[in-house]
């Protein structure tokens, strides 16, 4: 993953070559397997730079990339760095209502809310960006409002 990251950073031609050689598939696999944090971090960083057009987004989604992102976000054992990288990648991927709803359908709302408690301001900011993005779909906004009522109501009864 470190070598792919170096190539991805080196320029657009390298990114195109990596993409054409199945780089997205390899990187999604590296994120979904039980790899060391550094490998997952490098893979997520590279995916952020590779998944930028319709074809690469389709590859990412078809290869289970949304599921992998959801699993990483819901895994509270993952580091702030990994959570932040996932949240940095998601705006590249959640480009239409269908994908935004599919992501929420993976059960990530509670995990996203949990991450709002993090003391890392970058992670919280990226989390808010993702929450705003998914809430632009009416059905997701209703889900988030229902969750807000469930979370806030007990506080009102204190």
Image (cartoon, grey):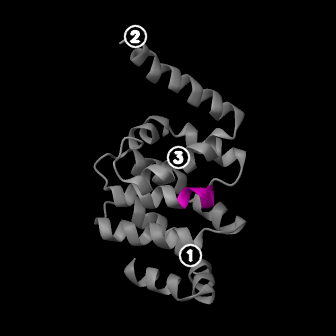
Residue behind mark 3 = 128
Determine crowd level at label 2: few under 14, some 14-19, many 20+ residues with C-alpha closer than 10 A.
Answer: few
Residue in the foreground of this view, choosing between 151 and 13: 151
The residue positioned 46% from the left and 54% from the top of the image is 68
Q: Of helix, strand and loop, which one carries label 1?
A: loop
Contact, CB < 8 Å: mark 2 with mark 3?
Answer: no
Q: State which mark lies toward you, 1 or 2.
A: 2
Magenta stretch, main secondary structure class? helix
Q: Position of residue 34 (x, y in %)?
A: 31, 60
Query: What residue sits right under mark 1 in the picture?
Result: 22
* Quadrant of the frame with the C terminus: top left
Element type where label 2 sits in the image? loop
Sequence-first disc among 2 and 3: 3
- Badge 1: residue crowd in 10 Å (few <14, some 14–19, many ≥20): few
Q: Is residue 100 above or below residue 28?
A: above
Residue 87: % across, % down: 49, 55
Image quadrant occupied by the N terminus? bottom left
Left or right, 36 with respect to 1, comes to: left
Residue 103's spot in the image, x, y percent? 57, 45
| Magenta highlight range | 89-93
Image depth: mark 2 or mark 3 in front: 2
Label 1 near label 3: C-beta < 8 Å? no
Q: Disc 3 and disc 1: Cα gap in Å?
A: 31 Å
The picture quadrant where one finds residue 35 is bottom left
């Amino acid at each position: 993953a470190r070598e792919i990251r170096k190539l991805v950073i080196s320029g657009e031609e390298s990114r195109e070559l990596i993409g054409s050689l199945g780089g997205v598939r390899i990187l999604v696999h590296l994120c979904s397997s039980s790899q060391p944090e550094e490998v997952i971090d490098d893979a997520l960083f590279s995916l952020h730079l590779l998944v930028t057009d319709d074809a690469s987004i389709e590859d990412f989604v078809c290869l289970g990339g949304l599921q992998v992102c959801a699993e990483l976000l819901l895994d509270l054992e993952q580091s702030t760095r990994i959570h932040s990288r996932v949240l940095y990648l998601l705006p590249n991927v959640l480009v239409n209502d269908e994908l935004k709803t599919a992501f929420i359908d993976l059960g990530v709302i509670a995990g996203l809310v949990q991450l709002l408690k993090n003391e890392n301001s970058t992670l919280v900011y990226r989390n808010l960006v993702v929450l705003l993005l998914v809430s632009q779909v009416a059905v997701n906004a209703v889900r988030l409002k229902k969750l807000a009522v469930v979370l806030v109501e007990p506080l009102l009864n204190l």
